């Protein structure tokens, strides 16, 4: 009568075979919260959570990795506090309209001012006049850089789609938006494309992320896909829709979505 052979050696042989077949197929690492774009610029990763507060001095107590706050109303100490807490900070400026309460309001020639954009104290700018607007916007970008911000969100980058009082075309907008991107990059700042969905295919390479309002309400979020495919965050908000009506859709598309009140205070309801 013979003994049965021990099972240890066949088991070891099987494990060796499995290891040999899977060699070089390591599990992928999870996506980082941010990455460096060409030139060393910060690029927020797809799906990055964020806070957007443009009303008053920033409340630094929101536990998210990215803040987007007003560049004039928040000083270097606020930015430094957020950096010390491990946050990245985006500098909001208005690049498409004149605002009658900003400290540099008198520097804008009256010839640049068009119709009201519907907000009290704001008037569209004639973005055809890059010769006049570039130095004015450069000073605003300088402010963002001096206060230590990581990036800039220039607002109202789709004037050509609105009744501004000027005969603006898509070509004017492309030139102006690319000028804004260049101003940021010259100062080591990332720049986000604000809305302007029709020109995304032409501009996605010029910007490190996108900021969008209400794409779910108007059913055009898919137009932001080029940014997601490029590994660039789309920072998205809705004002009227409940989160239950848009979060599933926008998260599937890779957007960093939340609901905000129109005054853009501290309150937020993330997906």
Image (cartoon, rainbow, N blue to C red):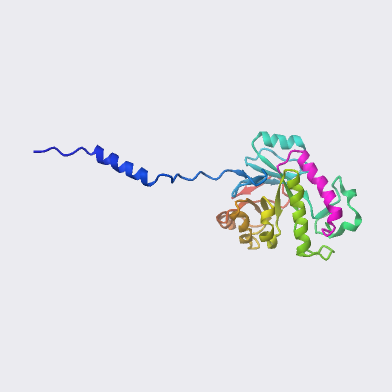
In this view, which residue lies farthest toward the left? 1
Which is nearer the eye, 105 or 120?
105
Residue 46: within the magenta? no
Which is nearer the eye, 259 or 252?
252
| Image quarter in which the N terminus is found | top left
Asked if residue 5 is positioned above or below residue 239 in the image, the reply reads above
* Residue 116 % position (x, y): 84, 59
Q: Is residue 183 left or right of residue 235?
A: right
Q: Is residue 267 left or right of residue 156?
A: left
* Residue 58 % position (x, y): 72, 40
* Residue 104 % position (x, y): 87, 46
Helix, strand or loop for the magenta stretch, by majority: helix
* Residue 51 % position (x, y): 66, 45
Residue 54 appears in the rendering = no
Snapshot quadrant of residue 96: bottom right
Residue 60 appears in the rendering = yes
Figure label count: 0
Residue 131: within the magenta? yes
Which portion, as a residue range, is magenta?
Answer: 126-150
Residue drawn where x is 36% and y is 43% of the image: 19
Residue drawn where x is 73% and y is 36% of the image: 78
Snapshot quadrant of residue 88: top right
Q: Is residue 27 left or right of residue 19?
A: right
Snapshot quadrant of residue 215: bottom right
């Amino acid at each position: 009568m013979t003994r049965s052979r021990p099972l240890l050696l066949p088991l070891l042989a099987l494990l060796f075979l499995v290891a040999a077949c899977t060699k070089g197929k390591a599990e992928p690492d999870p996506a980082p919260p941010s990455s460096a774009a060409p030139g060393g610029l910060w690029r927020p990763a797809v799906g990055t959570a964020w806070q957007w507060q443009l009303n008053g001095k920033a409340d630094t107590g929101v536990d998210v990795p990215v803040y987007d706050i007003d560049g004039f109303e928040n000083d270097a100490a606020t930015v430094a506090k957020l950096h010390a807490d491990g946050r990245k900070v985006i500098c909001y400026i208005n690049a498409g309209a004149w605002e009658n309460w900003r400290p540099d309001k008198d520097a804008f020639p009256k010839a640049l001012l068009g119709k009201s954009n519907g907000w009290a104290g704001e008037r569209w700018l004639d973005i055809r006049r890059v010769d006049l607007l570039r130095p004015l916007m450069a000073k605003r970008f300088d402010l963002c850089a001096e206060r230590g911000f990581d990036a800039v969100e220039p607002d109202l980058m789709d004037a050509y789609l609105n009744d501004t009082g000027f005969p603006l075309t898509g070509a004017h907008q492309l030139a102006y938006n690319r000028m804004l991107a260049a101003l940021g990059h010259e100062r080591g700042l990332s720049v986000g494309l604000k809305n302007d969905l029709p020109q995304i295919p032409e501009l996605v390479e010029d910007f490190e992320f996108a900021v969008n309002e209400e794409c779910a309400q108007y059913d055009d979020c898919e137009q932001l896909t080029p940014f997601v495919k490029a590994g660039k965050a789309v920072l998205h908000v809705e004002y009227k829709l409940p989160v239950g009506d848009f979060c599933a859709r926008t998260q599937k598309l890779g957007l960093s979505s939340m609901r905000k009140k129109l005054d853009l205070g501290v309150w937020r309801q993330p997906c």
